[in-house]
Each structure stands twice: as structure tokens, then as C-alpha cells.
Image: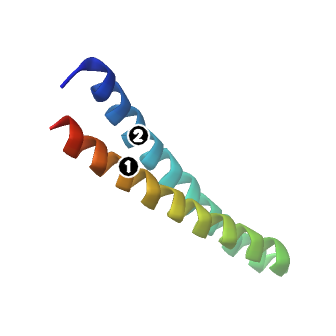
């Protein structure tokens, strides 16, 4: 596997991990916002967490395709 593909694989893996961390944090903070009686804020944060999950799904698909093509 050439260096450019390996670099891209590592980068996408990092993005997935980092994105998942953010998504989890959005969910955690949405719970806190709900407890502060900030329902609309919590709802938007949950939407952000959901969108983050979809981003991770797309990144994982890209990563799998990349690994197939690089293998």
C-alpha cells in the first residue's frame, strides 16, 4: 500500500474516532440541558448528535472502501 493511501486511512480513522467522541458529548450535554429546563436546546443538541452519527457512518463506509481498494 502506498504512503498516501495509508495516510488517508489513518486520517479517516482519526476522524471517525474524534467525531464519535463529539457525538457522545453532544448527547451527554443534551441530558444536562434538559435538566436545566432547556428543552429546545436539548432537542437541537440531540439532532447534532444524530447528525454526527450519520457522519461517522459515511466516514466508515469511505474507510471500508478505501481499505478494499488499498488491499
Q: Residue furthest top?
A: 3
Instruction: Judge whether residue 40 can be spotted in this image.
Output: yes
Query: Dividing the image into 4 quarters, which one contains the N terminus?
Result: top left
| Percent position of residue 6, x then y | 28, 27
Q: Residue furthest front?
A: 69
Q: Could you tell me which secondary element the residue under label 2 belongs to?
A: helix
Instruction: Judge whether residue 38 can be spotted in this image.
Output: no
Front residue of this view, candidates 67 and 28: 67
Q: Residues within 10 Å of mark 1 (few under 14, many from 20)?
A: some
**Residue 56 vs residue 47: left or right?**
left
Front residue of this view, candidates 20 and 56: 56
**Which residue is drawn at the image coordinates 36% and 55% (left, top)?**
61
Is residue 63 depicted above or below 3 in this figure?
below
Write down the residue under mark 2.
12
| Percent position of residue 58, x then y | 45, 57
**Residue 36 vs residue 56: left or right?**
right
Query: Dividing the image into 4 quarters, which one contains the C terminus?
Result: top left
| Percent position of residue 32, x then y | 71, 71
**Which residue is drawn at the image coordinates 37% and 42% (left, top)?**
13
Q: Nearer the viewer, mark 2 or mark 1?
A: 1
**Which residue is drawn at the image coordinates 41% and 40% (left, top)?**
12
**Which residue is drawn at the image coordinates 29% and 42% (left, top)?**
66
Using the numbered discs, state the Cα–Cα distance from disc 2 to disc 1 in whole angstroms. Answer: 8 Å
Do residues under tags 2 and 1 come within 8 Å of each other at their CB atoms? Answer: yes
Q: Could you say which disc has been placed on residue 62 in the image? A: 1
Q: Could you tell me which secondary element the residue under label 1 belongs to?
A: helix
Q: Quadrant of residue 31?
A: bottom right
**Residue 35 vs residue 51: left or right?**
right
| Percent position of residue 17, x then y | 43, 47
Amino acid at each position: 500500500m502506498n504512503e498516501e493511501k495509508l495516510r488517508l486511512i489513518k486520517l479517516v480513522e482519526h476522524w471517525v474516532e474524534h467525531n464519535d467522541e463529539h457525538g457522545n458529548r453532544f448527547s451527554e450535554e443534551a441530558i444536562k440541558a434538559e435538566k436545566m429546563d432547556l428543552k429546545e436546546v436539548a432537542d437541537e443538541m440531540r439532532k447534532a448528535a444524530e447528525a454526527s452519527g450519520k457522519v461517522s457512518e459515511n466516514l466508515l463506509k469511505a474507510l471500508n472502501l478505501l481499505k478494499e481498494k488499498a488491499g
